[in-house]
Image (cartoon, helix red, strand yellow):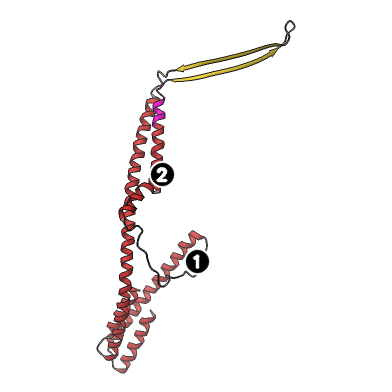
Amino acid sequence: RAAISEQLAAANRRFELGTASITDVRDAKARFDIVSAQQIAARNDLAAKGEALRAITNRYPGALAPLADGVHLQEPAPNDIEAWVNSAVTDGLAVVAGQAAVGIARMETKKARAAHLPKIDLTASYGETNSGTITTLNTDLDEHSVGVQFSLPLYSGGATVARQRETAKLLEKAMAELDGARRTSALHARQAFLNGSAGLAQVLALEEALKSAETALAANQRGLELGVRANIDVLNARQQLSETQ
């Protein structure tokens, strides 16, 4: 907005001197009005972002540090998309949680099947009593028993079969969710790798574009001074430079 304001002032001066047309002034004024409206929208967006940050930190943010100069972005290490995908489908949090869920479902299935099996229990007991009566004094009685108890479930009203079917379906569900987690993790890994690679290439391209935009602006300003460029050319060059920055 400051740069276009200077351009508008210069257009007005040249128009008063008769070296510029009213079109140049109106072009500069239109650009100035547009960028003023954009500045208002940007301020509103900044305020909204501040409120969103306050909702997380419970305090209003102060001055935020801008991007430091001379930042050198590194390529992904390793620079191999399949390596990241393989890591995601084996070590991703959603995949690890899905694997644990499948393991639990398998154990529940075995537990439900075991309800049909007979049980053998080893029992042991020991008892010691001491009593006395008129005819007997200090009578001690020790009892020891060891036994084996066998139980065979014959009928349980269908509850065991229903539970077995339920656990089998829950196992299928857990396995399907694990497969979905692996696919989703692979997709996110591919998207992240491609976005990172594309972003790095975009940064490098924009760095070169910034140099070109600065050169173009300087050339158009010089051309305007020499009378071989119009004010609209300088405005376009300024806008391109700002967008590139």
Q: Amino acid at mark 2?
A: Ala
Q: Residue 115's image quarter?
A: top left
Label ID, residue 61: 1
Q: Residue at x 38, y 76 (%)?
A: 36
Q: Which residues are magenta?
A: 109-117
Which numbered disc, 1 or 2, marks the residue closer to the eye? 2
Secondary structure beneath dot 1 equals loop
The mark nearer the N terminus, 1 or 2, is 1
Where does residue 165 sit, x and y in percent of width and height? 35, 30
Where does residue 43 sit, x and y in percent of width and height? 42, 71
Question: Is 115 one of the magenta-colored residues?
Answer: yes
Q: Amino acid at mark 1?
A: Pro
Q: Is residue 33 visible?
A: yes
Name the outermost residue toward the front: 78
Front-lying residue, 24 or 72: 72
Secondary structure beneath dot 2 equals helix
**Is 67 on the left or on the right of 86, as rendered?**
right
Question: Is 87 one of the magenta-colored residues?
Answer: no
Q: CA distance from mark 1 to mark 2?
A: 36 Å
Q: Which residue is mark 2?
A: 97
Front-lying residue, 133 or 41: 133
